[in-house]
């Protein structure tokens, strides 16, 4: 306690212990933090003084300064009660220990309040002590607007200096400019907040109007939906008008026909030999791009990044092998990628599921990984024998597989080893020319990756679990020399193409198996057989039939199976009789389409798709063709289903917007 010279006592605080004594200072000034209402609403900030007195020692009085900050409130009654419980001594009687502890807790609580509400504005900027509502340290201001205690600013301006200035802004001022403040309620209105409230009110009104308009549109769409449902019921009663395609078999909600294309991860329920196949639609392909190339061999497509990687052999440059990256959106945009001379011919190329890496198997005894972003080889595995095929692991992005010329299968981990993690010996010592990762059945609960490969003996299944030997797929025994293998992951269809072992067997082919669409037997072609087997479970396979086709007798051409949701699976291969891409519907092997022919035999066929569409590609030595898929059906039925799907989407959008508005 200190005397101010007028008989009044006041509390003195030094700047070093200001935070420690701030709770006691609040009790002395009787600071209240509570909301202040004016005109029916809270005021964001208020500074108000009251004339209530508090007794200190000899009965001296001081003024309290209630504060309201950011509309946050702390009840002042607790403050007054705490003042009555402050530490004091009367008639030599000391407070009990319990009361002392209670007072310390109150002081800590006040200190927390000061920290929470940032009450530094109650202190003089010169001495860092709280100012008073009267007395020597009465709150005073300068013409610039800054506040100080009267005694502090008086001493500051009476210093023997040529020019006196404000301690904070350096504005020139004199002692006579000091003005004591006798505080009355001061309200600072946040105009920015008020404008924001008005803007939100206007936005609410606009949303209500928009909601009303959407409700009207919703009523109209519901009426249209009822009319379409009635029309669809009439169509279902007339199967002849829909070419035996029943909407009841497609589902009770016809718009599932459109949305089913987005369910790429689910297995397609192809059921052969039953009436359920009537629900499947037919698919047609239309030529989109045709590019002239030089020395084309193999290619791979990446739909996620809209890229195509083409392997080439440039005859005029000493047989140099290189890659060409082509943009699927604009195929005229392409980049050449040089390969190391030791790579030699690329026998297989596969793009990773993430779409940023390409795996290359080459006759230069190398398994290479190419970065699709930098167009550089980032990893190279040196092998003991040439690699003919390769594949990525569908369960883990770190594992890659290589099929070798001696019939062995190698497993590599990209995370840091140059040696194979596992080496497995196949049932045949010949080259593994084709490799597919098998789709996992979640019901079986197997975490290991299984691979479907092909050698001259036929298809073979490998299990990467240690101790399990590969086995030949049943149903392909004694068919000849397997030259190509196609696998459809959605339908689990496997089609293997076989060349006859001798010309004698070629001449004795059953005439009933000859493809009626093929041209007369060409000199450069061999009449071969194509067998279809369906994978039923983990190791169960069902033979669904076979057919014959003219294939090149001097080239090992690749084939592909096209899986589209709600469509018949298609088998695509290069027909040597027409030198064009031929599509056969599975499981019937009926020819559905003959595409534009090439000048040279087709060497590779690939199909890639995303949630919306698919692209079929074929490459020969001098030409690259890209085809887009479209569905075949009665036009008015398709448009009706499409309209219903769009209508359902619109209704869902409207319901979502109504939910957000509410």
Image (spheres, grey):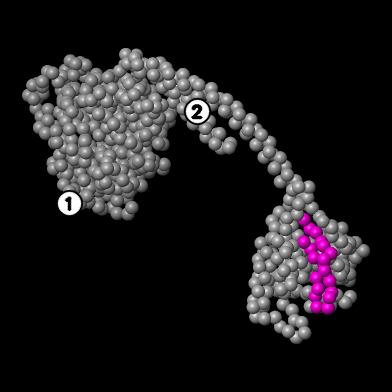
**Quadrant containing the C terminus in the rendered view:** top right
Please give the name of the residue rendered at 50% of the width and 24% of the height, measured from the top-left corner: 222
Q: Which of 597 and 47 is in front in this view?
A: 47
Say above or below: 216 vs 91: above
580 above or below 53? Answer: above
Image coords of residue 594 (percent x, y):
28, 19
Q: Main secondary structure of the magenta part?
A: loop
Q: Name the residue under label 1.
A: 467
Asked whether 484 falls inside the magenta stretch, the response is no
Say whether residue 386 is left or right of residue 183: left
Residue at x-position 44% and y-position 19%: 228
Numbered label tally: 2
Label 1 and label 2: CA atoms lie apart by: 55 Å
In this rendered view, identify the residue nearer to me: 564 or 46: 46
- Whether residue 381 is visible: no
SS for tag 1? loop
């Amino acid at each position: 306690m200190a005397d101010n010279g007028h008989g009044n006592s006041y509390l003195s605080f030094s700047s070093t212990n200001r935070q420690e004594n701030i709770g006691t200072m609040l009790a002395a000034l009787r600071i209240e933090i509570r909301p202040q209402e004016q005109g029916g609403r809270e005021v964001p900030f208020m500074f108000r003084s009251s004339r209530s007195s508090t007794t200190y020692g000899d009965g001296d009085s001081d003024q309290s300064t209630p504060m309201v900050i950011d509309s946050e409130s702390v009840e002042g009654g607790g403050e007054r009660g705490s003042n009555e419980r402050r530490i004091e001594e009367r008639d030599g009687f000391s407070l009990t220990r319990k009361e002392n502890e209670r007072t310390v807790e109150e002081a800590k609580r006040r200190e927390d309040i000061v920290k929470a509400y940032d009450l530094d504005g109650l202190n003089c900027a010169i001495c860092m002590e709280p100012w008073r509502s009267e007395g020597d340290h009465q709150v005073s201001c300068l013409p610039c607007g800054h506040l100080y205690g009267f005694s502090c600013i008086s001493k500051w301006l009476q210093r023997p200096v040529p020019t006196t200035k404000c301690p904070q802004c350096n504005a020139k001022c004199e002692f006579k400019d000091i003005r004591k403040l006798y505080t009355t309620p001061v309200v600072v209105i946040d105009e920015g907040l008020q404008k924001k409230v008005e803007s939100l009110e206007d936005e609410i009104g606009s949303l209500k109007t928009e909601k009303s308009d959407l409700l009207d549109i919703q009523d109209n769409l519901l009426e249209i939906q009822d009319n379409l449902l009635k029309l669809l019921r009439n169509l279902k009663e007339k199967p002849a008008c829909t070419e035996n395609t029943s909407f009841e078999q497609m589902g009770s909600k016809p718009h599932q026909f459109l949305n089913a294309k987005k369910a790429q991860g689910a297995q397609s329920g192809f059921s052969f030999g039953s009436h359920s196949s009537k629900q499947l639609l037919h698919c047609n392909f239309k030529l989109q791009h045709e590019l002239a190339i030089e020395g084309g061999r193999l290619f791979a497509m990446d739909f996620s990044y809209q890229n195509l990687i083409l392997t080439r052999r440039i005859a005029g440059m000493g047989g140099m092998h290189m890659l060409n990256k082509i943009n699927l959106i604009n195929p005229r945009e392409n980049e050449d990628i040089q390969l190391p001379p030791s790579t030699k011919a690329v026998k297989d190329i596969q793009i990773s599921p993430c779409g940023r890496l390409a795996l290359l198997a080459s006759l230069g005894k190398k398994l290479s990984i190419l970065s699709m972003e930098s167009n550089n080889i980032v990893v190279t595995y040196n092998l003991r024998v040439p690699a003919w095929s390769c594949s990525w692991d569908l369960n883990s992005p770190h594992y890659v597989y290589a099929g070798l010329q001696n019939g062995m299968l190698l497993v590599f981990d990209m995370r840091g080893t140059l040696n194979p993690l596992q080496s497995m010996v196949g049932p045949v010592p010949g080259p593994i020319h084709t490799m597919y990762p098998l789709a996992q059945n979640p019901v079986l609960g197997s975490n290991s990756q299984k691979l479907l490969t092909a050698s001259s003996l036929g298809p073979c299944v490998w299990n990467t679990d240690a101790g399990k030997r590969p086995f030949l797929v049943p149903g392909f025994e004694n068919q000849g020399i397997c030259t190509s293998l196609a696998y459809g992951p959605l339908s689990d269809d496997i089609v293997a193409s076989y060349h006859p072992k001798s010309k004698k067997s070629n001449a004795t082919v059953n005439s009933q198996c000859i493809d009626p669409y093929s041209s007369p037997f060409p000199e450069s072609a061999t009449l071969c057989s194509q067998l279809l087997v369906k994978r039923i479970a983990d190791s169960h396979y069902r033979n669904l039939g076979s057919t014959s086709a003219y294939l090149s007798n001097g080239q090992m051409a690749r084939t592909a199976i096209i899986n589209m949701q709600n469509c018949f699976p298609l088998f695509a291969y290069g027909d040597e009789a027409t030198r064009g891409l031929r599509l056969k519907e599975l499981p019937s092997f009926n020819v559905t389409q003959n595409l534009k022919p090439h000048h040279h035999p087709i060497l590779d066929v690939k199909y890639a798709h995303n949630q919306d569409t698919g692209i079929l590609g074929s490459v020969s030595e001098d030409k690259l063709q890209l085809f887009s898929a479209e569905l075949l059906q009665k036009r008015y039925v398709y448009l009706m289903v499409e309209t219903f799907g769009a209508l359902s989407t619109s209704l869902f959008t409207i319901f979502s917007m109504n939910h957000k508005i509410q």
